[in-house]
Amino acid sequence: MDAMTTSPVEGNNCAIKKGPSRIHSQMNLSKSLPRVYEGINARIERSSNKAKRDITRLSYSSRALTADFVNEKGQALVDRNFDSRFIYKGAQISEEGWLVWCFTKKRHEELKSEPWCYLPSYQRVHQLRVMRNGEKLFLHCSCGFYHRTGIPCPHFFYLVDEIDLIMIHVRYWKVYHAFFNEDSDIGRYLTKAQAQHFENRMNGVPIRRHHLEALRAKVSMRSFPACLEGTTEADWKQANFVMSRDACTSNELAQFDTSSEDDVSFGENGGDSEFDFAEECTTYKSEDAKRMHSEIAASAVRCDKMSTDEQTMCWKNCTEDCKAVLESHLPRNRKKDFEREISLLRLRYMSELRPVEAVGKDGGIEMCATHNNEREHRSQRYLSSTDYRKSK
């Protein structure tokens, strides 16, 4: 997550080529390698000192109980997901299973003309379930956010209205960067904590016993599915519609009539429901989208043609390559072989030419019948400009 480039090699350019321990191409190995080691040790020491100073600092940007124990970046990610939990909807589908979704995100009116707005946007309903490993409890979400980042997702915080230090991956703790892998008690404890996270990384977010009891107490009746607080029957119908399709776009969900004739009732806390979603909804594609597809296709055709500068550079490179071979000390028969290969290449590429369509001056479509002849003339002129034709 902290990467500044897509290449690990390019990411080290700044550290190796700049600073007091920088190296350059004129240094030999006996001088450059010690400077590289010196720079690595200096950066490790600076990072360790900064991490130890951060332990004593208090965070005033967050009111969470974990703010003094988690680094600034990790706490910001946790707070963002925790604060966004109010826009989500949910329902309990079993004793230890829940569904959480959010269909309220809409594109701004001013951005609907942007090209990326024509890409399909898909809606999803995420499933959360309790998992166990011995006496340890976990709440696993199908979105996979915790597995990728080590931070609980908004779907998790919708159900568990609390931030606990055990929910956050150990690499975000302040003491981790200061004492990890040190030959001390705290260093060994941190190594053990990281090993436990690796062991249970597929199980989900760690929770305590009272978290599970609070989840079970969200609904009083044991009749499932049961809507959670803030979720209406119309929200549940939308979730069922999304789950009934292999891939549901935002336009398909917008076309779905939430006030259908199906009678959905949960009673006071829950109930069974059945829906018929046989009606097909087609994905909307506007005339502007079709126009943009045509413009993109036409632009791709234009990009396939070489500009004048590109043709000049190509001509120069080919001429220099031919002169380099012919002016070398190669035997006469090798130069003749080179001539024959050039002729074969010319015939092969010229055979691929076909009459092409071009736009006339009046905007109409006309056939360029002399296109092949012009190419043939240019190729003959190029071959006659080389010295090996005159050496016969």
Image (cartoon, helix red, strand yellow):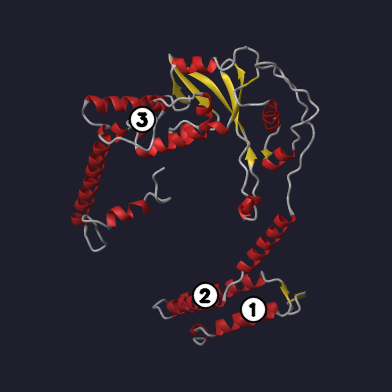
Report the residue at 52% width, 75% height from top: 314
SS state under label 1? helix
> Which three-letter amino acid code belongs to the residue tagged 3?
Val
Tell whether 135 sits left or right of 242. Answer: left
On residue 314, the disc is 2
* Three-letter amino acid code at the position of disc 2: Cys
- Tags 2 and 3 in contact by the CB under 8 Å rule? no
Please rate how many residues cluster around mark 3, counting C-alpha atoms within 10 Å: few if below 14, some from 14 to 19, many from 20.
Answer: many
Against 183, residue 117 (above or below) is: below
Mark 1 vs 2, N-terminal side: 2
Instruction: Say which residue label 3 marks.
Output: 170
Camera-side residue: 244 or 159? 159
**Distance CA(mark 1)–CA(mark 2):** 15 Å
Question: Which residue matches tag 1?
Answer: 375
108 or 28, which is in the foreground? 108
Q: Does residue 149 show up?
A: no
- Amino acid bearing label 1: Arg
Q: 10 Å neighbourhood of mark 1: few (<14), some, or many (≥20)?
A: few
Give the x, y percent position of residue 126. Answer: 59, 30
Q: Secondary structure at mark 2?
A: helix
Locate residue 345: give its quadrant: bottom right
